[in-house]
Each structure stands twice: as C-alpha cells, then as structure tokens.
Amino acid sequence: MTVALIPSPTTAVWHLGPVPIRAYALFIVAGIVVACVVAEARMRARGAPRLAVLDLAVWAVPFGIVGARLYHVITSPDRFFGENGSPVEIFYVWNGGLGIWGGIAGGAVGVWLACRQLGIPFRLVADAAAVGIPLAQAVGRLGNWFNNELYGTATTLPWGLQVHQMQDGQAVPNAITGELALPGLYHPTFLYEALWCVGVAILVWRLGERLDLGRGRQFALYVMAYTAGRVWIEMLRIDDTAEMPTPEATDAVITVLGQRINVWVSVLVFLAALAYFVWVRGPREFLLPAEGGGFRVVTEPEFRAAGLAGAEPGGGEPLGDDRPPGEDPTALVTGEEPTAPVADPAEDPTALVTGEDPTALVTGEEPTAPVADPAEDPTALVTGEEPTAPVADPAEDPTAPVTGEEPTAPVTREPGARARPDRADGT
C-alpha cells in the first residue's frame, strides 16, 4: 500500500479561446525572467550599464532555444525520423525536448555577439550569469513535471512519482490497464535536478565571492557542479527508452555503451570545465567607463576607489554629497552636512552692521559674546564695551532719561515742611 507519492498533473495545456496556454512554455519563460533578474543584479554590482541584460537576452534567448532544440533532435532522432516519427514535430517545442547543452552553447553564441556590440567582456557576463542559469533550469524543470516527462526507474520510496501517458497536453488512459496513471511509482528525476540546480546556484554564489573567482571561473564552477549531478540523474532516467511501461515504448535516444548520450556529454563537458578552472587564474572583474567610450576592466579595489559602485557608469554621479563645492568645501571630503554654515558677505552685506560677529566670516563659528546694540548703550559705538550698568526703564524711573543714572534714594519730607536746597558745605 502506497502511503505517499508525488502526483503529476493530468493537464499541461489550457485554452484561452483559440490560444493554447502551455505550462511548459510558461515555466520556460519564468526561468528566463529569473535568469535575467539575477544576472542584471550581478552585472550592475560590477559596473555594467543599467538593463544591459535585456540587450544580451535579445540575442541569447532565441539562439539558446534553437540550440537546445537542435541538441534534442540530434540526440533523440528516432522521435522525429524513426518509424513512427514525424519531422514536423521538430517545431513543436511546447511538447518538451530542449537539451540544456545545446541551449548553453546557442545562448553563449548569442551573448558573445551582444557583448561585441556593447563593449562588455564575455567572461564577465558569463560569471554574472553563472548563478541565474541554474535557477532558471530549476524553474524550467517544473514544466517537465506538467508534461509528465523526465522521470526515472520504478521506486517504492515515499516520494515516488505518479506518471500519466500524455497526448496533446492531456492525460489519456493506459492501453493495458485503462487507468490514467502508469502502473507503479517512479523516481522524480525532474525534482532531483531542480533541487540540484538550486544547490549549484548557492554554491557558485558563495564560493565565487569567497574565493574571488573571476575571468570565467564562476561559470566553469557552475558547469562542473551541474554536470556532476546530471550524470547520476541521467543514469536513473527511463523516459524515451524501451523501459517505459507502455506497449509502444522504444529507445528514442542515442545510447553509447549502455548509457544515454547525455551521460557521456556531461562527462566530457565536466572535464573541459575542470581544465579551464585549473588553468585560468584571476580575480573578479569590474567595469569602469573608458575615455574613448565603452568600458575598461579593473579590479575590485580600483572599482571601489573610483566611487562608482552602484552608480550609473558612463555618466552617473559618484556616491557621496552632490552639492557644488562652493556651498560646502568639506562636503567632497567628508560627505557630511556642515555643523554651521559659513557666512558669505556677498550674500549678506549687512552682516557687519547688524551686530553679528565679524569673525564668523573667517571661523564659521558662533560669536562668544554679542556686540552691544547702540540703541541700548550709546557708548558702545565708541568704546565697543558693554555698559557697567543697564539703562533704567523710564517707566520705573522718570529721571532716568535725563541722567542715565539710578536715583540714590527716594525724596521724602515732613508734612508742612519746605524743601530747601542743600548747602555746598553740607550744613
């Protein structure tokens, strides 16, 4: 009794009026979007112009699809040219059948052509794409799940895959049992590869930065890691072979020494990537605008020193304060706001008249003591000093406006007594 399994969809195509919407195509497009988003972020971090990945994708996507289809046709010829084959199905890409190595090779040709036009080194783009490509493959493998393809030998594991025989995007009854599902459960090799690709992306991302891998070595690391997994996953597969549990099952793929051709291709590609990884040396590469146009390759310290990290190459502003030097001469050095603005006589000609500290023009600091106001102390204009005693308020002392002094004592007299002037001798 089966206690767990992974079910497979019975429908891989929907119709929006006369337009078919195919799951396989949707996941291929979603994978392309994921690869472009990741590559854009990684290229921008290295100084590439904004949205340069779109210029690359215009070339890479069509070349990659054509290359992937050609690889599948070459390695599985009986499906199209065999006894029951149909050559016209070569163009039915939505039914599945895109070989990854043909896609990588075709896409590389497209990227190389685009790099020549943009003036960007091909190796830098390859390293930037080395994380997004395996993530795109992981997403694309979900399209294989909808098509009920890319499965392995029978298994009793709890994650065994239920498989249907598909025709025109719909599950059809099995000719032997009459059931929609094929008898038994099978290794979900599409899922194995999807999870493996996610791990490859993480590996390239982390080791690429930690070991400072450049000059195409991150892409070589991706190729080695992916092919190492593809070998054992490919050896589990039985789809497109006579081992399929259907009456009309035949070998539709080329085999060499009892193994599918993809196994041997993966081994050869792994060895080529290993040789490149060992032979080539160099740190990660970054871009700076060149004087005559285009870009020049620099190291990371040179890139950071130029102050263009995250800025627009070829016309972007450097990081830091973007004010003109005349407003704050220290801004270009410290990148901070000044603690106090420097007074400019040309902007404020009254600064010397209003009682502000003339030294502020030189030091840019607040005055230690305010200059006395002539309206409060008439002698301030002559002595420049503060009065020893504040001027009395006329509302408190009527004599204050005349003498400017405080009264010594209030004047009192007895009732009926006459006021008389003081004598000079005090009597």
Image: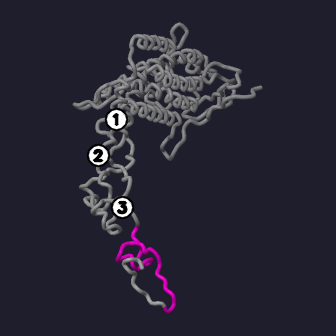
Image: 85 above or below 94: above
Provide the residue designation for mark 1: 49
The one nearer the camera, 34 or 427, is 427
**Does residue 99 show up?**
no
Q: Earlier in the sequence, mark 3 or mark 2?
A: 2
Provide the residue designation for mark 3: 386
Task: Say which quarter of the image contains residue 297.
Answer: top left
Q: Earlier in the sequence, mark 1 or mark 2?
A: 1
Q: Residues within 10 Å of mark 1 (few under 14, many from 20)?
A: many
Residue drawn at (36%, 76%), measured in percent from left and top?
401
The residue type indicated by label 2 comes to: Pro
The residue type indicated by label 3 comes to: Glu
Q: Secondary structure at mark 3?
A: loop
How far apart in space, not on screen, are marks 3 and 2 (Cα)? 41 Å
How far apart in space, not on screen, are marks 1 and 2 (Cα)? 26 Å
Q: Position of residue 340 (x, y in %)?
A: 37, 50
Image: 348 above or below 216: below
Q: Position of residue 413 (x, y in %)?
A: 49, 85
Q: Residues within 10 Å of mark 3 (few under 14, many from 20)?
A: some
Q: Secondary structure at mark 1?
A: loop
Is residue 415 highlighted in magenta? yes
Residue drawn at (39%, 70%), measured in percent from left and top?
391
Quarter of the picture containing the N terminus is: top right
* Residues in magenta, as a range: 390-416
Provide the residue designation for mark 2: 324
Which residue in the rendered view is the most extreme toward the top? 257
